Image: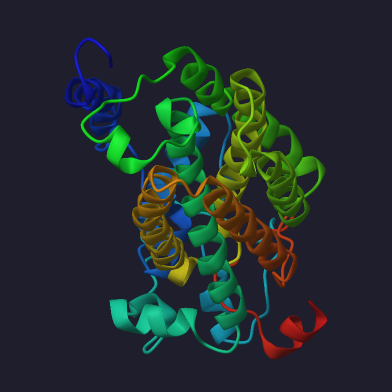
Amino acid sequence: MPKLGWRWLLALSSVPTSILLLFYKVTPESPRYLCLKGRTTEAVSILEKIARINGRELPSGILVSDNHIELYEIGNPSEDTNLLSEGKNDVEPPEGGVSDLGGVSSILMLLSPKLARSTLLLWAVFFGNAFSYYGLVLLTSELNSGHSKCVPHHLDKGKSPDVSYKEVFIASFAELPGLLLSAVVVDKLGRKLSMSIMFFLCCIFLFPLMIHLPGGLTTSLLFGARICITVTFTVVYIYAPEIYPTSVRTTGVGTASSVGRIGGMICPLVAVGLVHGCHQLLVVLLFVMVALLSGVCVMFFPLETMGQDLRDSLPSQNQTNST
């Protein structure tokens, strides 16, 4: 960064991501999705490939999706009765079923009575997560630069503050323990509890930053806050697909992620603009409030999905009430 500038940093950082394009052609489609579309022959082919890779054999029989069985009131089959055969067994998706939803219809289903609460809370959490995450990234550089001690704007004009890249690197390294911690807590504490705890801990780490602190202490607090927000960001991407049925899963996660990007676009105006305007207390307080409200929203999610199977369709009213 000091030698080549931000353009080269951005270009070089994008190289590893571009390698993922090589995996596009070899990535299989979801058998669950193919079943809902009635393309069971393709689903069987993918399942056979998975079985070969894992050194297993598929049971004999016919592959039938849960959604198709429910429509004919046969009841939900057990794991042993979803059997497979090599023959042609494509099943036409039911007319008017959820498998042929258009884009607008999928969005409307996200806001249907059975999903509206989960959807709106998920949007709030994604927004708060992205706002806090990218805000902390920007605060890391801002609070470790010449702006960590506020100077009048007219005296600072035209000067480029020196950034302590060592302190920025240390705080940024919090991503690694954050990812490792998320892998531990997500199945130990559950999705909801792990996210809410980490949001509240993030508030505790951020609170002292309302005033100017020594560089080492500032870096330590940012390190802790970034661990917490990395955990919540990771866990919410695990949780989001689990609360939606297959028919609207990608739409639900994609829409929530888009709402999060709005938070990511807004946060630079806060993290940079307010710090430059000598409002460190205000900007940190704002991040504390966003993280706190996000943690509260997590507590109101209607479902804890740890240990539960993914759903192919919306639950019935009785299932919703029992949940």
The quadrant of the picture occupied by the C terminus is bottom right
Q: Position of residue 283 (x, y in %)?
A: 52, 51
Location of residue 93 by image quarter: bottom left
The one nearer the camera, 46 or 126, is: 126
Q: Is residue 42 above or below residue 37?
A: above
Residue at the top extreme of this rendering: 3
Q: Position of residue 204 (x, y in %)?
A: 74, 44
Q: Residue at x 43, y 25 (%)?
A: 145
The one nearer the camera, 254 or 142, is: 142
Q: How many marks?
A: 0
Q: Residue at x 47, y 65 (%)?
A: 249
Left or right: where does residue 163 sit relative to residue 118? left
Q: Position of residue 252 (x, y in %)?
A: 45, 67
The quadrant of the picture occupied by the N terminus is top left
**Can the viewer see residue 102?**
no
The one nearer the camera, 245 or 194, is: 194
Location of residue 177 by image quarter: top right
Q: Residue at x 41, y 26 (%)?
A: 146
- The colour scheme used to paint the residues is rainbow
Q: Is residue 136 above or below residue 100?
A: above
**Can the viewer see residue 242?**
yes
Q: Position of residue 98 (x, y in %)?
A: 43, 80
Left or right: where does residue 3 sit relative to residue 132? left
